[in-house]
Image (cartoon, rainbow, N blue to C red):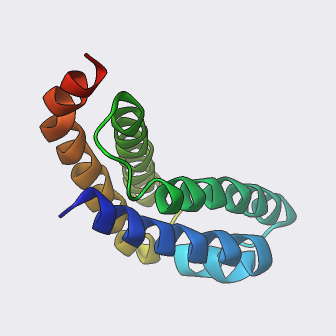
């Protein structure tokens, strides 16, 4: 998968997630099997504000040529989505999230791996651009 295609997919997904978290946080919490307490709604809306940043970075950066900045974005997104997947598994095993979190775990794992592959495969190309 190309960086552009991956970034377009991430931008679409994170924009939709961001809007859902900002304006319909109860629905996201329901999918995850989490009680929609006031605290959970508060954190969900704040997460929505962060996910819009992923959407903007992915969409506006989708045509970036290999560079040290693109490498940093790839590694940062890979680590972020990898951490989300690990946290999802952890909370599922603890019983704080329901089976609805399995699809996000799979998607987060795939995005983490895909951005890591692009980061790994573009390392030397990005270094050549700097020289």
Residue drawn 23% across the image and 51% down it? 113
At a point 52% along the width and 58% down the height, the residue shown is 60
Q: In this view, does 97 lie to the left or right of 42?
A: left
Q: In this view, does 3 lie above or below 72?
A: below
**How many numbered marks appear?**
0
**Residue 105 is drawn in which quadrant?**
bottom left
Q: Residue 131 vs residue 59: left or right? A: left
Whether residue 33 is visible here, answered yes or no, is no
Q: Nearer the viewer, residue 4 or 31?
A: 4
Identified at 41% across, 50% down, the residue is 81
Residue 7, position in %: x, y? 38, 62
Q: Seen in the image, is 82 located left or right of residue 12?
A: left
Q: Which residue lies furthest to the top in this view?
A: 131
Answer above or below: position of 19 versus 85.
below
- On the image, the x and y values in percent for residue 116 come to 24, 43
Q: In this view, does 61 lie above or below 73?
A: below
For the point 25% across and 16% down, the residue is: 131
Q: Which of 60 and 25 is in front in this view?
A: 60
- Could you tell me residue 51's position as x and y percent? 61, 58
Residue 50 shows in this picture: yes
Position of residue 110 measured from the top left corner of the image (x, y, whole percent): 26, 60
Q: In which quadrant is the N terminus drawn? A: bottom left
Q: In which quarter of the image is residue 130?
A: top left
């Amino acid at each position: 998968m190309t960086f552009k295609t991956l970034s377009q997919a991430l931008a679409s997904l994170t924009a939709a997630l961001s809007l859902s978290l900002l304006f319909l946080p109860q629905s996201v919490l329901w999918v995850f099997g989490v009680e929609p307490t006031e605290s959970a709604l508060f954190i969900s809306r704040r997460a929505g504000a962060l996910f819009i940043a992923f959407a903007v970075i992915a969409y506006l950066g989708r045509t970036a040529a290999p560079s040290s900045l693109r490498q940093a974005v790839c590694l940062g997104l890979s680590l972020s989505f990898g951490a989300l997947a690990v946290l999802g598994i952890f909370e599922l095993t603890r019983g704080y999230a329901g089976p609805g979190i399995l699809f996000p775990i799979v998607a987060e794992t795939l995005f983490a791996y895909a951005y890591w592959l692009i980061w790994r495969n573009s390392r030397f190309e990005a270094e050549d651009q700097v020289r």
